[in-house]
Image (cartoon, helix red, strand yellow):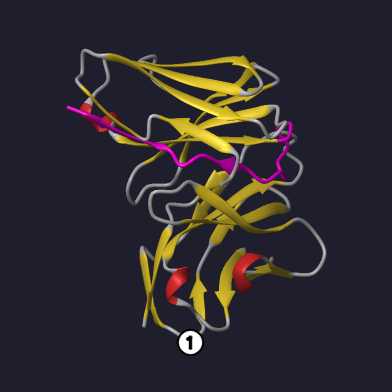
Amino acid sequence: ETGVTQTPRHLVMGMTNKKSLKCEQHLGHNAMYWYKQSAKKPLELMFVYNFKEQTENNSVPSRFSPECPNSSHLFLHLHTLQPEDSALYLCASSRPDRANEKLFFGSGTQLSVL
Amino acid sequence: AQSVAQPEDQVNVAEGNPLTVKCTYSVSGNPYLFWYVQYPNRGLQFLLKYITGDNLVKGSYGFEAEFNKSQTSFHLKKPSALVSDSALYFCAVSPRNSGNTPLVFGKGTRLSVIA
């Protein structure tokens, strides 16, 4: 148990649906991240939040919309997704974003877009 | 821009034999280097990191990694593999003088330890 909880664990949605992924940590961390994991591809950084402020958006399409209401919670709002968006979406947290800090990951949400 | 290469998609090793999972990196200046492991249906877990000092870094579950600056490599090793080591292993890098640049990960190497 890493202390980072993601819900739901699995999600199946149609291309016209709107859904949200949730991430929660109570480790006292102030940096939170969304990563996309696809088979045989490098882990892709999507968004970074430091102290609730977005500090990185890695050219992610606007159909993915992050929200960080406080340092413990992070959401990823999804709308009009494409089948190629099917992947495992991982949330992570760390102490304030520094290059040598280790990340704590949740178990991920396995997303299937039909 | 920094990058990580894990040249093997899959590594197979017999239980009790030594294992090596390869990683090379490209980064401006000196790197911070990491290994993470992902067990089935789980997120990534931190194994070890190289920040500075001794080139041989020891981490969790008996794993170690050797930083080789001339070869820009950071291979993960374990003297005697266990079946329970079977998992997906990720190497990651960040430049030392980058401030807050997040980690860049490789594509992962699946390790299969056969009894």
Q: Main secondary structure of the magenta part?
A: loop
Look at the image and tell me in which quarter the C terminus of chain A lies: top left
- Whole-percent x, y for residue A38 in the image: 34, 43
| Residue A20 appears in the rendering | yes
Residue beneath label 1, please? Answer: B16
Give me the residue at 70% from left, 41% from top.
A99
Between residue A80 and residue A71, name the one nearer to us: A71
x then y, percent, for residue A41: 37, 47
User: How many neighbours does mark 1 have within 10 angstroms: few (below 14), some (14-19), or many (20 or more)?
Assistant: some
Say which chain tag 1 marks. Answer: B
Mark 1: which amino acid? Answer: Gly
Residue A11 position, x and y percent, is 29, 29
Number of marks in picture: 1
Give the vertical position of B4 relative to B80 (above or below).
above
Q: Secondary structure at mark 1?
A: loop
Is any atom of residue B7 visible in this view?
Answer: no
**Measuring 51% from the left and 84% from the top, which residue is drawn there?**
B18
User: Is residue B24 depicted above or below B114 in this figure?
Assistant: above
Which of the 4 image quarters holds residue B63? bottom right
Image position of B26 (left or right of A102): left
Among the 4 quarters of the image, the one containing residue A8: top left
Q: Residue furthest left?
A: A114
* Residue A31 as seen in the image, left or right of residue A108: right
Left or right of residue A23: residue B33: right
Please give the range of residues in magenta. A95-114
**Figure check: A66 above or below A105:** above
A37 falls in the magenta region = no
